[in-house]
Amino acid sequence: MTILNVLVYPDENLKKISQPVKDFSADLKKFVRDLEETFRSFPGCVGIAAPQVGWFERIVLVDISHKPQHASHGFLVLINPEIKFYEGTSLGREGCLSVPDYTGKVERAKSITLEAVNESGEKLQFCMSGYEARAVQHEMDHLDGKLFLDRLVGRRNALSRRTEVST
Amino acid sequence: MMENWLMLTLVGKDRPGIVAEVSHALFNMKGNLGEASMTRLGGNFTIMLMVSIPEKKSAVAEKLRPLCDKLKLFFHLDEVEADLHHHIEPDVRISIHGADQAGIVAHATSALFKAGLNILNLESDVGGNPENPVYIMHIEGVAGKGLDTVDKALQTLARENNVVASMTPIDTMVG
């Protein structure tokens, strides 16, 4: 397995739109293993998207299981993911491997229903909320060339009753 | 070569165009802005900004003076170490609000300091109307002695000062 080079903003490649995976070959499985090793090499990180390493196919990995305070579906390999249903909003702080030394507040859907396929092309469906839903939405944004910087909520935020993170 | 960083502090009666004119003046001196806080406090506009600039502090001050005189702005320059790219992540956000009263910031920040909080950002506003002003404060910081210690300090603060004080953990998601 190989640790891949992570693209860092303002690299223009981070704005590219990734294409759906069509070929579920051994090459795809090898790439997913390399992407996982890259992801695991950043302690505290909860997800990575293929375009962050310059591979422009719709693949994201998410694993928040090392944060036991949040409900988790474990290690997720999500290929061609689509969010079918959004509910509620939540404000939380995000950072990104591709944007070092900066974090900011971002509004995301609180709960989502997600469909994807795995490396063998088998259908997956998840209902998730809170931290894990935030991680999936953050990673899926990369597939459309978006960064959390595109969704920042201003620093001044008065008397908001919105949830800062978790839940 | 070491970069020459200055911290520019600037205050004056608010009017449109202050930011554009000041930043343009710095740009004309080949200044490169770093991090900045620019905000309206009451009817005043305030700027604190870092600027990396080839000229010495005295020369920058000399060139800023005519503009600041024209805009009726007080300003001050200090030589500083930039220390950029070392952001500290907050792990707690605190909200305090209540009827405005002298000493609330002193009481709150003393209690939070004793509870181990390192304040990274504090913003406060006076809202309500002149007869019944309301004080609203938001703080982000690092809870050096843990969140429970901060929470207990806030409960005591709320009880003793008749304010609403609450905290929310910040669990930054890095993806």
Image (spheres, coloured by chain):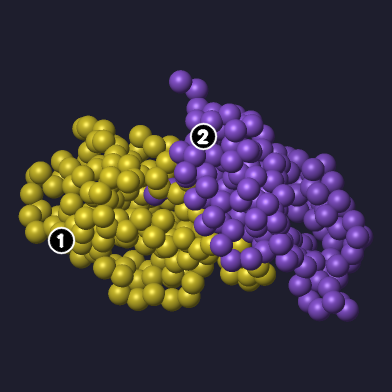
Q: Would residue A17 be seen by someone viewing this image from the given angle?
A: yes
Do callouts 2 and 1 point to residues on the same chain? no
Q: Check residue B53 in the rendering and tell me which mark sits there, or answer none.
A: 2
Q: Indicate the quadrant where residue B57 lies.
A: top right
Q: Check residue A20 in the rendering and tell me which mark sits there, or answer none.
A: 1
Marks 2/1: CA distance? 48 Å
Depth-wise, is mark 2 or mark 1 nearer the camera?
Answer: 2
Question: Residue, x 39% and y 70% (percent of image)?
Answer: A112
Quarter occupied by the N terminus of chain A: top left
Q: Determine the colour of chain A.
A: yellow
The residue lying toward the viewer, choosing from B134 and B175, is: B134
Image coordinates of residue B43 in percent, x first then y, are: 73, 66
Image coordinates of residue A26 in percent, x first then y, are: 9, 45
Q: Is residue A166 left or right of residue A87?
A: right
The residue lying toward the viewer, choosing from A61 and B25, is: B25
Question: Residue, x 52% and y 57% (percent of image)?
Answer: B20
Q: Check residue B14 in the rendering and tell me which mark sits there, or answer none.
A: none
Query: The residue under label 1 is which amino acid type?
Result: Pro
Image coordinates of residue A114 in percent, x first then y, are: 31, 68
Of all chains, the one bearing label 2 is B
Q: Indicate the quadrant where residue A80 lies.
A: bottom left
Q: Determine the colour of chain B.
A: purple
Image coordinates of residue B135 in percent, x first then y, are: 80, 67
The residue lying toward the viewer, choosing from A95 and A9, is: A9
Q: Is residue B104 left or right of residue B3?
A: right
Question: Residue, x 74% and y 65% (percent of image)?
Answer: B42
Of all chains, the one bearing label 1 is A
